Image: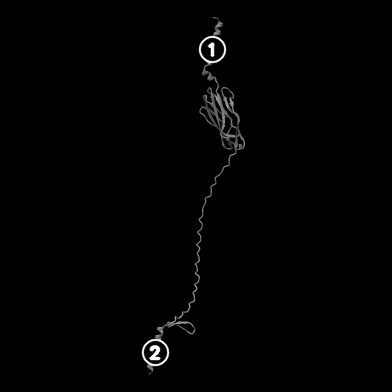
Amino acid sequence: MSKRSLSLSLIFILLISTLAIFSHPALALAQTPPSLEMSVLPQAKYAVAGQAFTYTVVMTNTGPGPAQEVMVFVTPPPGVTQIQAGQHPAWFTSAPASNETGKVAWATLSPMAAGTAVRFEMVVVVLPEMAGQHLVLEDYGIVPMHAGGLLASGPPLKTEVRAAPPTLTATPLPTAITANPPNPTATTLPTPTSPPISLAPTSPAVPTTGASALPSATSTNPTGDSTTLIWPLSGLSLLLLIIVGLAWFWKSR
């Protein structure tokens, strides 16, 4: 066999071996890049000025292979402060100081399996002067660190900011005190006066015909006044006068 034929045979064997190696299913799966998706969900349809507001970041690996050396980042919108980032045991978390602004990032510490999702939270406090305006979150995305470029980024996310409701101060109600009404003064009712009784004049007694009239115990003096006579006393006086007269007569003899 000539040298030329030997060289062609070796090249043909190498080509066949290379095709066989790269056509293996496990190797092909490892070389396929994963499909990653990211979404940011606001806490509510509107935020309240001066209060905390939460953004939830969802990172999903739809496959077919695992995701590794991937970073997810979110830049807080203008008009917020006191930025806090949630922790995850399989991801490295980076966040600015509470009184500073900057990106919040999460990076994989171990491969993220296909068909899995992970959630992160970013909590901010809306400045009071943002009332009546909007929080605009537009800088967020996924960066594969081995690729060195932005893989995916979402559309701007606007959230209305409303003024905080007025604080209502509870005022204690006055205690109702029921005063005992004074006892009414007892009113003395006047003693009912009986009307004078008029005595009807006494009619003079009418003598009964045929009956003897008894001597009256009443004599009438010349003035017309009635005087009651005591009969026993008058008889005794007469007796004394007779005795005195007899005695005087007997003495004069």
* Rendering colour mode: one colour
Residue 234 locus on image (x, y percent): 41, 85
Q: Which residue is painted at 41% across and 83% down in the image?
A: 231
Residue drawn at (55%, 10%), measured in percent from left and top? Answer: 12
- Residue 16's mark? 1
Find residue 45 and report its image quarter.
top right
Closer to the camera in the image, 186 or 13: 186
With 22 as the anchor, is 247 left or right in this view?
left
Q: Amino acid at mark 2?
A: Ile
Q: Quadrant of the N terminus?
A: top right
Q: Which residue is mark 2?
A: 242
Disc 2 secondary structure class: helix
Q: Residue at x 58, y 26 (%)?
A: 152
| Residue 160 in picture, x, y percent from top left | 60, 35
Mark 1 nearby-residue class (10 Å; few <14, some 14–19, many ≥20): few
User: Is residue 96 visible in the rendered structure shown here?
Assistant: no
What amino acid type should be assigned to the residue bearing mark 1?
Ile
Q: CA–CA distance between discs 2 and 1?
A: 205 Å
Label 2 crowding class (10 Å Cα cut-off): few <14, some 14-19, many 20+? few
| Element marked by disc 1 | helix
Q: Outermost residue, right direction? A: 133
181, 2: nearer the viewer: 181
Q: Quadrant of residue 211?
A: bottom left
> Residue drawn at (39%, 89%), measured in percent from left and top?
242
